[in-house]
Image (cartoon, rainbow, N blue to C red):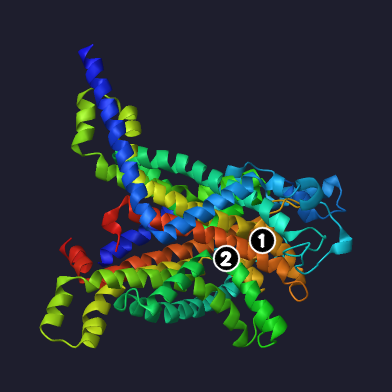
Amino acid sequence: MGAAKTNGAAHTGATVKKRSQAAEIWRRLKKNRMAMLGLAVVLLLVLISIFADFLFDYDTIVIKQNTQIRLQSPSGEHWLGTDEFGRDILARIVHGSRVSLSVGVVAVSISLMIGGTLGAVAGFYGGKVDNVIMRFMDILLAVPSLLLSITIVSALGPSIFNLMLALAISSVPGYARIVRASVLTVKDQEFVEAARCIGANNFEIIASHIIPNCMAPIIVQVSLKVASAILSTSGLSFLGLGVKAPTPEWGAMLSGGRAYLRNAPHLTIFPGIAIIITILSLNLLGDGLRDALDPKLKK
Amino acid sequence: MSRYILKRLVMLIPVVIGVTFMVYFILSLSPGDTAAMIAGETADAETIEAVRKDLGLDQPVIVQYGKYMLNLLRGDMGQSYKSKRDVFPSIMASFPNTAKLAFWSILVAVGIALPIGIISATRQYSMIDNVGMVAALLGVATPNFWLGLMLIILFSLNLGWLPSGGMGGWKNYIMPAITLGTGDAALITRMTRSSMLEVIRQDYIRTARAKGVPEKKVIHKHALKNALIPVVTVIGIQFGSLLGGATLTETVFAWPGVGRIVVDSIKSKDTPMVLGAIVLLTITFSVVNLAVDILYAFIDPRIKAQYKRK
């Protein structure tokens, strides 16, 4: 009874402290105007991709071909013009944000789960386990990441899921390294020893004591990695190894516009700007988070 | 020091074996029948079987891989399924093109990044600093294949100043090198700036100023030398990844490099070419990274001393 009570008290204590820590991070982040701008744009993009169907209907606007109005320049009716099949470019960019954001988020989640677990295990157990895991990571790291993604997608066939998987696999070693390094700095600290003393098993120690204390570098890495996953997605689609037509994807749209560079450059210009805005805002947010999470790093 | 280099070189061997195995295995998962594709659309079942046997494709993947590795040890990467020519010389013929482009790109990157990075740090929050940092942020966020296409629209199609692709005279280098160089420049600028800012706050800089060393000399002699150590590493890593296949830029500018071989061969399911190109690019990438590590130890006396002690 007494023990339970202490436990409960400790628990509420922890949440109060956690909340104040989050509030403190938020306070620091709010002061960073560039980061707030990045956050605002990211939120806007998320909203746009959620409500894409309300803005432009998928079947009648986004993928329906209408050759009579093909390759039109931007106008009042089609703000960003139309593409080689007479489809509205703005509508395709709006729907393309769904593909890009979902590929980015899913790819990063998969690689974080795999890489994070491997890194945590390697760092926590050390010795042979560490050696085997990290040597395997070295092999993955030795292949330039775009080449690795190209190889995986081409073997599995171009589709959104395979794209996610390819991007995820090629960024697994990055997470494994970060998490491993964080675990190594945390694992010998006293609170881990204390947890072991009160009988926590390895899994509990990793999950509830070590991982939460490694969160700062992981959060920063995630926001930056979503950006690079989106960039790689567009790159792979540009090579014809990404999303299949007629799904609107920014890189694929760019690639489709290549044949019309001379007479209809808007086909390539606008999807590129959409990519830049997305990556820029994610990077601004990531940089801001890094400064907010670790004031020591701020220069 | 030489022992360290030797050790690192030896460590490359398992990495290369691992990479070849991984890539070989991944490519073996490819859908579609390679033998049927090579035999051609009109081939009958018997011909396809003959081709399959001829190429050893009827054997288990692990056996195929073992044979491949034995041949690789003799420097034989097999023959292209498509052109029937030996893989190694075909790839080596394209490698200089990738290397030349990488060289000019990194030159562009360093030429832009170092001056801007240094000025940004010495005049923090000035106009130049702000403009430079915004440009660097944009540079990181811009997909280089898009930048390449924009340059083509402007300089080839509208102004007609530069050729839009291929490899001929020096003019062909300008746009690909700028495309690749500016992206790297963005990274190197940020690194130079933050490294410089850190060094400028060190005690020895204060000491130099206090004893009356002119500001120019403080920056150039005392600060820059120390600040450049991490920057050299970033430059080296970027150079390595440029050598590791600037696939997208090579595709945009129809540049006859190794990155393009990979893409073209993947499309035609020419596994020996894909594998050969990736193995060579990976070895190059790893060797450059190793060279960067060694260089780092050489230019940083603190690290050099560590190895000497061992």
Determine which residue is flagged by label 2. B143
In this rendering, would B66 be left or right of A205? right
Is residue A32 visible in this depiction of the protein? yes
Instruction: Please identify the quadrant where the C terminus of chain B is shown.
Output: bottom left
Say what secondary structure mark 1 lies in: helix
Between circles 1 and 2, the one closer to the viewer is 2
In the image, A169: left or right of A150? Answer: left
| Drawn side of residue A49 relative to residue B1, left or right | right
**Mark 1 touches mark 2? (CB < 8 Å):** yes
Q: Extreme front residue here?
A: A76
Instruction: Farthest residue to the left: give it.
Output: B211
Q: Chain of mark 1?
A: A
Which numbered disc covers residue A238? Answer: 1
The amino acid sitting under disc 2 is Pro
Q: Nearer the viewer, residue B129 or A51?
A: A51
The front one of A28 and B306 is: A28
- Residue A7, quarter of picture: top left
Q: Position of residue A23 (x, y in %)?
A: 34, 43
Identified at 19% across, 30% down, the residue is: A194
Q: Position of residue A185 (x, y in %)?
A: 25, 45
Q: At x 34% / y 38%, what residue is drawn?
A: A211
The spot of residue A182 in percent (x, y) is 31, 46
Q: CA distance from mark 1 to mark 2?
A: 11 Å
Is residue B239 in view? no
**Within 10 Å of the Cα at label 1, are there few (<14), some (14-19), or many (20+) other Cα atoms?**
many
| Residue type, numbered disc 1 | Phe
Say above or below: A163 vs A262: above
